[in-house]
Amino acid sequence: MTGRKVTANLSLSLDGRYHGPGGPADFGAFVPYVTSEVARDHMSGIWEDATTALLGRVNAEGFMGFWPAVAEDENADPRDRGYARWLVDTEKVVLSTTLTEAPWERTRVVNAPAADIVAELTSAGEGDVLVNSSPTVIKELLSADLIDRLHLLILPEILGGGERLFEDGLPATKWKVARQRTGELGEIALVYDRVR
């Protein structure tokens, strides 16, 4: 073991959902909160110690279709631009059963269980491995108790539908609050560390 931590980032509604009842593209309720000052500061903290981004294919495609332009945009919020530059420049591992080659620089496509990839990544190298807004990957790693830190942005809304992050059947685990901050809209940025 190298001491690399596995961290994960996700925005959730008050009822624990990572998208609305309209399906995976239903993020309307999230938009006002994820661009707030607290959310942008929170986002700056998720990648500062990370040297590898672990992503599911859907998020990787969405991110790489959006963030490279932000990295080049001199008028973008400096926090957004910092994250975008990190994402473009860092090592990316994309979990996919359909991609056959990496469509982005510094990217490796892998068709393997997330737990196996995390074991490989944490056995060598330095810096955190960030599972960035990829709920299916986060769920798999929570099931295997392989996440050391959770960065959560909690929205003060009950969506009443959509997929939940914390489903029945997860192993019982204990977490401690490392940081918390509440924004003007009622959003709460939380950082939880796994107690082992």
Image (spheres, helix red, strand yellow):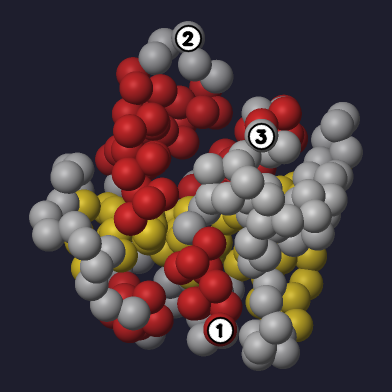
Q: What residue type is labelled 2?
A: Asn
Question: Mark on residue 143?
Answer: 1
Q: Which residue is drawn at 43% across and 55% down?
A: 50
Label 1, label 3: how far apart the Cα atoms are: 28 Å
- Residue 146 shows in this picture: yes
Compared to residue 29, the image places residue 58 above or below, namely: below
Q: Disc 3 or 2, which lies upstream in sequence?
A: 3
**Viewer-nearest of discs 3 and 2:** 3
Q: Which residue is drawn at 47% across and 9% down?
A: 75
Where's the C terminus, which quadrant? bottom right
Task: Identify the residue position indicated by label 3 in the image.
Answer: 28
Crowdedness of circle 3 by 10 Å Cα count: few (<14), some, many (20+)? few
**Viewer-nearest of discs 1 and 3:** 3
**Viewer-nearest of discs 1 and 2:** 1
Task: Identify the residue position indicated by label 2 in the image.
Answer: 75
Mark 1 in CB contact with mark 2 (< 8 angstroms)? no
